[in-house]
Protein backbone atom coordinates (compact mmCIF):
# COMPACT_ATOMS: atom_id res chain seq x y z
CA UNK A 1 0.00 0.00 0.00
CA UNK A 2 1.22 3.50 -0.88
CA UNK A 3 -0.37 6.43 0.91
CA UNK A 4 -0.26 10.03 -0.32
CA UNK A 5 -0.38 12.55 2.52
CA UNK A 6 -1.26 16.06 1.37
CA UNK A 7 -0.02 18.57 3.94
CA UNK A 8 2.95 18.44 6.28
CA UNK A 9 1.67 20.46 9.19
CA UNK A 10 1.29 18.95 12.62
CA UNK A 11 -1.52 16.60 11.55
CA UNK A 12 -0.12 15.49 8.19
CA UNK A 13 3.45 15.11 9.44
CA UNK A 14 2.23 12.86 12.24
CA UNK A 15 0.15 10.71 9.87
CA UNK A 16 3.14 10.28 7.56
CA UNK A 17 5.55 9.51 10.41
CA UNK A 18 3.24 6.95 12.01
CA UNK A 19 2.57 5.23 8.67
CA UNK A 20 6.28 5.12 7.83
CA UNK A 21 7.02 3.62 11.25
CA UNK A 22 4.66 0.80 10.33
CA UNK A 23 6.42 0.10 7.03
CA UNK A 24 3.86 1.82 4.80
CA UNK A 25 5.15 3.52 1.64
CA UNK A 26 4.34 7.22 1.97
CA UNK A 27 4.50 10.21 -0.35
CA UNK A 28 4.18 13.57 1.42
CA UNK A 29 3.14 16.54 -0.73
CA UNK A 30 3.26 19.95 0.87
CA UNK A 31 3.11 23.43 -0.57
CA UNK A 32 4.85 25.98 1.63
CA UNK A 33 1.88 28.32 1.98
CA UNK A 34 2.68 31.44 3.98
CA UNK A 35 0.40 31.50 6.98
CA UNK A 36 0.34 27.77 7.65
CA UNK A 37 -0.84 27.40 11.24
CA UNK A 38 2.02 25.04 12.04
CA UNK A 39 4.61 27.49 10.77
CA UNK A 40 3.22 30.31 12.88
CA UNK A 41 2.37 28.29 15.94
CA UNK A 42 4.32 28.34 19.15
CA UNK A 43 2.13 26.50 21.51
CA UNK A 44 1.39 24.92 24.80
CA UNK A 45 0.62 21.36 25.86
CA UNK A 46 -1.37 21.55 29.08
CA UNK A 47 -4.78 19.94 28.52
CA UNK A 48 -5.73 19.90 32.19
CA UNK A 49 -6.25 23.67 32.32
CA UNK A 50 -8.63 24.11 29.40
CA UNK A 51 -12.00 25.68 30.15
CA UNK A 52 -13.78 23.51 27.56
CA UNK A 53 -15.83 20.81 29.26
CA UNK A 54 -17.11 18.71 26.34
CA UNK A 55 -16.35 15.16 27.61
CA UNK A 56 -15.47 13.43 24.34
CA UNK A 57 -13.36 16.36 23.14
CA UNK A 58 -11.54 16.57 26.44
CA UNK A 59 -10.77 12.86 26.29
CA UNK A 60 -9.08 13.47 22.94
CA UNK A 61 -7.32 16.60 24.21
CA UNK A 62 -5.97 14.86 27.30
CA UNK A 63 -4.86 11.84 25.27
CA UNK A 64 -3.03 14.23 22.94
CA UNK A 65 -1.09 15.67 25.84
CA UNK A 66 -0.33 12.23 27.23
CA UNK A 67 0.92 11.05 23.82
CA UNK A 68 3.74 13.58 23.73
CA UNK A 69 6.02 11.49 25.93
CA UNK A 70 5.75 8.59 23.49
CA UNK A 71 6.17 10.86 20.47
CA UNK A 72 9.23 12.68 21.78
CA UNK A 73 10.80 9.44 22.94
CA UNK A 74 10.35 7.88 19.53
CA UNK A 75 11.78 10.87 17.69
CA UNK A 76 14.75 11.07 20.05
CA UNK A 77 15.36 7.39 19.40
CA UNK A 78 15.39 8.14 15.67
CA UNK A 79 18.10 10.75 16.22
CA UNK A 80 15.79 13.78 16.13
CA UNK A 81 16.70 16.21 18.89
CA UNK A 82 15.75 19.62 17.45
CA UNK A 83 12.10 19.37 18.42
CA UNK A 84 11.30 22.69 20.06
CA UNK A 85 9.67 20.80 22.93
CA UNK A 86 10.39 21.18 26.63
CA UNK A 87 8.51 20.39 29.80
CA UNK A 88 8.85 23.66 31.64
CA UNK A 89 5.60 23.45 33.59
CA UNK A 90 2.58 25.72 33.33
CA UNK A 91 1.36 28.59 35.48
CA UNK A 92 -2.42 28.93 35.55
CA UNK A 93 -3.72 32.20 36.94
CA UNK A 94 -6.60 34.66 36.56
CA UNK A 95 -7.29 38.26 37.48
CA UNK A 96 -10.84 37.35 38.53
CA UNK A 97 -10.97 35.47 41.88
CA UNK A 98 -14.01 33.43 40.89
CA UNK A 99 -12.37 32.32 37.64
CA UNK A 100 -9.23 31.40 39.55
CA UNK A 101 -11.20 29.30 42.03
CA UNK A 102 -13.04 27.53 39.19
CA UNK A 103 -9.73 26.87 37.44
CA UNK A 104 -8.31 25.29 40.56
CA UNK A 105 -11.31 23.01 41.00
CA UNK A 106 -11.22 22.00 37.35
CA UNK A 107 -7.50 21.25 37.40
CA UNK A 108 -7.77 19.24 40.62
CA UNK A 109 -10.54 17.10 39.15
CA UNK A 110 -8.61 16.36 35.98
CA UNK A 111 -5.11 15.75 37.30
CA UNK A 112 -6.52 13.19 39.74
CA UNK A 113 -6.54 10.77 36.79
CA UNK A 114 -3.54 12.22 34.94
CA UNK A 115 -0.25 11.37 36.67
CA UNK A 116 1.61 12.86 33.71
CA UNK A 117 0.50 16.32 34.92
CA UNK A 118 2.79 15.98 37.93
CA UNK A 119 2.32 17.25 41.45
CA UNK A 120 0.16 20.35 41.01
CA UNK A 121 0.52 22.99 43.69
CA UNK A 122 -0.78 26.43 44.53
CA UNK A 123 1.85 29.16 44.46
CA UNK A 124 1.73 32.45 46.30
CA UNK A 125 1.99 35.62 44.23
CA UNK A 126 5.65 35.91 45.16
CA UNK A 127 6.37 32.32 44.19
CA UNK A 128 4.56 32.77 40.87
CA UNK A 129 6.61 35.86 40.04
CA UNK A 130 9.79 34.01 40.93
CA UNK A 131 8.98 31.54 38.16
CA UNK A 132 7.71 34.17 35.67
CA UNK A 133 9.37 37.45 36.71
CA UNK A 134 7.38 39.79 34.42
CA UNK A 135 4.05 38.56 35.83
CA UNK A 136 1.63 41.07 37.29
CA UNK A 137 1.98 41.47 41.05
CA UNK A 138 -0.52 39.97 43.45
CA UNK A 139 -1.57 36.96 41.36
CA UNK A 140 -1.50 33.50 42.85
CA UNK A 141 -1.08 30.67 40.38
CA UNK A 142 -1.40 26.92 40.08
CA UNK A 143 1.80 25.30 38.87
CA UNK A 144 1.39 22.18 36.72
CA UNK A 145 4.81 20.51 36.25
CA UNK A 146 3.68 18.45 33.25
CA UNK A 147 2.91 21.51 31.13
CA UNK A 148 5.14 21.94 28.08
CA UNK A 149 5.96 24.37 25.30
CA UNK A 150 6.25 23.43 21.63
CA UNK A 151 7.75 25.06 18.55
CA UNK A 152 5.44 23.58 15.93
CA UNK A 153 7.79 24.42 13.07
CA UNK A 154 10.57 22.31 14.53
CA UNK A 155 8.40 19.41 15.67
CA UNK A 156 6.53 18.95 12.40
CA UNK A 157 9.78 19.18 10.42
CA UNK A 158 11.32 16.52 12.68
CA UNK A 159 8.39 14.16 12.06
CA UNK A 160 8.78 14.65 8.31
CA UNK A 161 12.53 13.99 8.48
CA UNK A 162 11.93 10.87 10.55
CA UNK A 163 9.38 9.65 8.01
CA UNK A 164 11.80 10.26 5.13
CA UNK A 165 14.54 8.40 7.00
CA UNK A 166 12.13 5.46 7.13
CA UNK A 167 11.60 5.57 3.37
CA UNK A 168 8.90 8.20 2.82
CA UNK A 169 9.18 10.56 -0.15
CA UNK A 170 8.74 14.31 0.41
CA UNK A 171 7.75 16.74 -2.31
CA UNK A 172 7.33 20.50 -2.11
CA UNK A 173 4.55 20.88 -4.66
CA UNK A 174 0.90 21.48 -5.30
CA UNK A 175 -1.61 18.61 -5.28
CA UNK A 176 -4.88 18.38 -7.19
CA UNK A 177 -7.53 15.68 -6.73
CA UNK A 178 -9.91 14.21 -9.29
CA UNK A 179 -12.16 11.21 -9.75
CA UNK A 180 -11.07 8.40 -12.04
CA UNK A 181 -13.17 5.26 -12.34
CA UNK A 182 -14.90 5.85 -9.02
CA UNK A 183 -11.67 6.39 -7.13
CA UNK A 184 -9.76 9.50 -6.24
CA UNK A 185 -6.38 10.13 -7.74
CA UNK A 186 -3.81 12.85 -7.23
CA UNK A 187 -1.89 14.99 -9.69
CA UNK A 188 1.12 17.10 -8.86
CA UNK A 189 1.77 20.71 -9.88
CA UNK A 190 2.97 19.59 -13.32
CA UNK A 191 -0.21 17.60 -13.91
CA UNK A 192 1.49 14.24 -13.48
CA UNK A 193 -0.29 11.46 -11.62
CA UNK A 194 1.15 10.66 -8.20
CA UNK A 195 0.75 6.92 -7.60
CA UNK A 196 -1.08 5.97 -4.45
CA UNK A 197 -3.69 3.58 -3.09
CA UNK A 198 -4.88 5.87 -0.31
CA UNK A 199 -4.98 9.66 -0.07
CA UNK A 200 -5.01 11.63 3.19
CA UNK A 201 -5.91 15.30 2.92
CA UNK A 202 -4.36 17.14 5.85
CA UNK A 203 -4.18 20.52 4.19
CA UNK A 204 -5.25 22.64 7.14
CA UNK A 205 -7.03 25.85 6.21
CA UNK A 206 -6.51 25.03 2.50
CA UNK A 207 -8.17 21.59 2.66
CA UNK A 208 -11.53 22.94 1.48
CA UNK A 209 -9.89 24.12 -1.74
CA UNK A 210 -8.24 20.74 -2.26
CA UNK A 211 -11.50 18.83 -1.75
CA UNK A 212 -13.80 21.17 -3.68
CA UNK A 213 -13.07 19.64 -7.16
CA UNK A 214 -14.45 16.35 -5.78
CA UNK A 215 -17.75 18.00 -4.89
CA UNK A 216 -16.97 17.73 -1.18
CA UNK A 217 -18.05 20.73 0.89
CA UNK A 218 -15.50 20.58 3.69
CA UNK A 219 -16.70 22.75 6.62
CA UNK A 220 -13.32 24.17 7.65
CA UNK A 221 -12.43 27.83 7.26
CA UNK A 222 -9.29 29.82 8.07
CA UNK A 223 -9.25 31.52 11.46
CA UNK A 224 -6.55 34.16 11.48
CA UNK A 225 -4.19 34.40 14.41
CA UNK A 226 -1.65 37.16 15.00
CA UNK A 227 1.14 36.06 17.34
CA UNK A 228 3.72 38.50 18.65
CA UNK A 229 7.31 37.58 19.45
CA UNK A 230 9.17 39.82 21.90
CA UNK A 231 12.70 39.85 23.25
CA UNK A 232 13.74 40.69 26.79
CA UNK A 233 17.36 41.59 26.14
CA UNK A 234 19.76 39.93 28.53
CA UNK A 235 17.05 37.98 30.35
CA UNK A 236 17.38 34.19 30.59
CA UNK A 237 13.90 32.95 29.70
CA UNK A 238 14.75 29.38 28.73
CA UNK A 239 13.15 27.73 31.75
CA UNK A 240 10.20 30.01 32.37
CA UNK A 241 6.92 28.07 32.51
CA UNK A 242 4.15 28.66 30.02
CA UNK A 243 1.52 31.10 31.25
CA UNK A 244 -2.22 30.48 31.00
CA UNK A 245 -4.25 33.42 32.35
CA UNK A 246 -7.65 31.81 31.70
CA UNK A 247 -8.38 34.06 28.71
CA UNK A 248 -8.06 33.36 25.00
CA UNK A 249 -4.46 34.59 25.19
CA UNK A 250 -1.35 32.82 26.42
CA UNK A 251 2.38 33.31 26.85
CA UNK A 252 5.46 31.15 26.53
CA UNK A 253 9.18 31.66 26.22
CA UNK A 254 12.13 30.21 24.33
CA UNK A 255 15.87 30.03 24.80
CA UNK A 256 16.89 33.28 23.05
CA UNK A 257 15.28 35.68 25.56
CA UNK A 258 12.13 35.37 23.46
CA UNK A 259 8.62 35.76 24.84
CA UNK A 260 5.69 34.76 22.64
CA UNK A 261 2.26 36.29 23.23
CA UNK A 262 -0.72 34.88 21.41
CA UNK A 263 -3.07 35.25 19.82
CA UNK A 264 -6.00 36.78 18.01
CA UNK A 265 -8.86 34.56 16.87
CA UNK A 266 -10.23 36.27 13.79
CA UNK A 267 -13.11 34.47 12.11
CA UNK A 268 -14.34 35.26 8.59
CA UNK A 269 -11.05 36.98 7.74
CA UNK A 270 -10.20 34.77 4.77
CA UNK A 271 -6.53 34.56 3.96
CA UNK A 272 -5.63 38.06 5.10
CA UNK A 273 -1.88 38.02 5.58
CA UNK A 274 -1.62 41.53 6.99
CA UNK A 275 -0.39 42.39 10.45
CA UNK A 276 -3.07 44.80 11.59
CA UNK A 277 -3.09 47.59 14.14
CA UNK A 278 -6.10 46.05 15.86
CA UNK A 279 -4.45 42.65 16.07
CA UNK A 280 -1.21 44.07 17.43
CA UNK A 281 -3.09 46.20 19.96
CA UNK A 282 -5.20 43.28 21.19
CA UNK A 283 -2.30 40.93 21.76
CA UNK A 284 0.04 43.51 23.26
CA UNK A 285 -2.66 44.80 25.61
CA UNK A 286 -3.49 41.28 26.77
CA UNK A 287 0.18 40.48 27.26
CA UNK A 288 1.06 43.58 29.23
CA UNK A 289 -2.08 43.33 31.33
CA UNK A 290 -1.04 39.97 32.72
CA UNK A 291 2.72 40.59 32.44
CA UNK A 292 3.43 44.33 32.74
CA UNK A 293 7.12 43.61 32.98
CA UNK A 294 7.07 43.27 29.19
CA UNK A 295 6.59 47.02 28.68
CA UNK A 296 10.20 47.54 27.54
CA UNK A 297 10.48 44.33 25.52
CA UNK A 298 11.54 44.60 21.88
CA UNK A 299 9.05 43.49 19.22
CA UNK A 300 10.93 40.99 17.05
CA UNK A 301 8.18 39.86 14.70
CA UNK A 302 4.50 39.16 14.36
CA UNK A 303 3.60 35.85 12.77
CA UNK A 304 0.35 35.24 10.94
CA UNK A 305 -1.22 31.80 11.04
CA UNK A 306 -4.51 30.48 9.70
CA UNK A 307 -5.98 27.88 12.01
CA UNK A 308 -8.22 25.29 10.33
CA UNK A 309 -11.43 26.03 12.23
CA UNK A 310 -14.38 23.69 11.92
CA UNK A 311 -18.01 24.21 12.93
CA UNK A 312 -17.29 22.97 16.46
CA UNK A 313 -14.31 22.46 18.73
CA UNK A 314 -13.99 18.83 17.62
CA UNK A 315 -11.40 17.84 15.02
CA UNK A 316 -12.51 16.18 11.79
CA UNK A 317 -10.70 13.03 10.72
CA UNK A 318 -11.36 9.64 9.21
CA UNK A 319 -12.45 8.13 5.93
CA UNK A 320 -14.73 10.23 3.74
CA UNK A 321 -17.97 8.23 3.37
CA UNK A 322 -18.79 7.08 -0.13
CA UNK A 323 -15.34 7.90 -1.53
CA UNK A 324 -13.03 4.93 -1.74
CA UNK A 325 -9.44 5.55 -0.69
CA UNK A 326 -9.92 9.10 0.64
CA UNK A 327 -9.41 10.25 4.22
CA UNK A 328 -9.32 13.68 5.84
CA UNK A 329 -7.46 15.01 8.88
CA UNK A 330 -8.38 18.57 9.76
CA UNK A 331 -10.36 20.99 11.91
CA UNK A 332 -7.94 21.16 14.83
CA UNK A 333 -8.46 24.89 15.31
CA UNK A 334 -6.62 26.30 18.30
CA UNK A 335 -5.98 22.78 19.65
CA UNK A 336 -3.68 21.70 16.83
CA UNK A 337 -0.46 21.58 18.78
CA UNK A 338 -1.97 19.53 21.60
CA UNK A 339 -4.16 17.23 19.53
CA UNK A 340 -2.41 17.08 16.14
CA UNK A 341 0.27 14.44 16.77
CA UNK A 342 -2.12 12.06 18.52
CA UNK A 343 -4.95 12.58 16.02
CA UNK A 344 -2.40 11.83 13.31
CA UNK A 345 -1.60 8.52 14.97
CA UNK A 346 -5.31 7.65 15.14
CA UNK A 347 -5.82 8.54 11.49
CA UNK A 348 -2.81 6.45 10.48
CA UNK A 349 -4.45 3.51 12.28
CA UNK A 350 -7.73 4.15 10.43
CA UNK A 351 -5.99 4.22 7.03
CA UNK A 352 -4.29 0.90 7.84
CA UNK A 353 -7.55 -0.66 8.98
CA UNK A 354 -6.40 -0.97 12.57
CA UNK A 355 -8.57 -0.43 15.65
CA UNK A 356 -8.08 2.93 17.34
CA UNK A 357 -7.32 3.47 21.01
CA UNK A 358 -10.23 5.89 21.42
CA UNK A 359 -13.68 5.91 19.80
CA UNK A 360 -13.45 8.16 16.75
CA UNK A 361 -16.94 8.12 15.23
CA UNK A 362 -17.68 11.58 16.66
CA UNK A 363 -14.91 13.03 14.48
CA UNK A 364 -15.80 11.37 11.17
CA UNK A 365 -15.98 13.66 8.12
CA UNK A 366 -19.18 14.01 6.12
CA UNK A 367 -19.50 13.51 2.36
CA UNK A 368 -21.02 16.95 1.72
Image (tube, grey):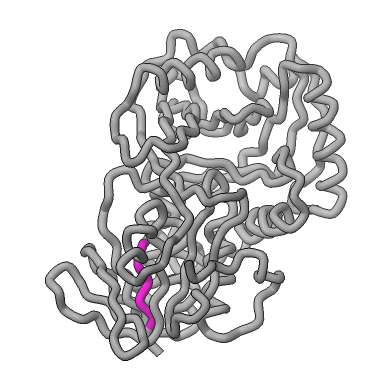
**Figure check: 152 above or below 2:** above
Q: Position of residue 258 (x, y in %)?
A: 43, 28
> Left or right: where does residue 65 sit relative to residue 194?
right
**Figure check: 328 above or below 279:** below
Q: Residue most toward the left? A: 190
Q: Which residue range is magenta in the image?
A: 3-7
Identify which residue is drawn at 48% across, 19% down. 282
Residue in front for this viewpoint, 60 or 244 = 60
Residue in front for this viewpoint, 23 or 307 = 307
Q: Quadrant of the N terminus?
A: bottom left
Identify which residue is drawn at 49% across, 74% down. 320
Q: Position of residue 117 (x, y in %)?
A: 75, 47
**Figure check: 95 above or below 322:** above
Q: How many marks?
A: 0
> Left or right: where does residue 70 sit relative to residue 357?
left
**Figure check: 85 above or below 276:** below
Q: Position of residue 168 (x, y in %)?
A: 34, 77
Amino acid sequence: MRVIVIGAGMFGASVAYQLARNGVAVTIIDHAHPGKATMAGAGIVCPWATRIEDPSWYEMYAAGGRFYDELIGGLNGAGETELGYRKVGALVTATDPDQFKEAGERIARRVATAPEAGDVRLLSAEQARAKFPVLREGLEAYFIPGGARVDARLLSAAMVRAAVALGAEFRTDYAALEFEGGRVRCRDGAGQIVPGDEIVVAGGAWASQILEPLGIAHPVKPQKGQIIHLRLAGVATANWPVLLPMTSHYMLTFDDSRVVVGATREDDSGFDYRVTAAGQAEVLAAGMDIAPGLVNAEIIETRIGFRPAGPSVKPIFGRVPGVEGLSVGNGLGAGGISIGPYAGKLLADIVQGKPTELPVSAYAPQRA
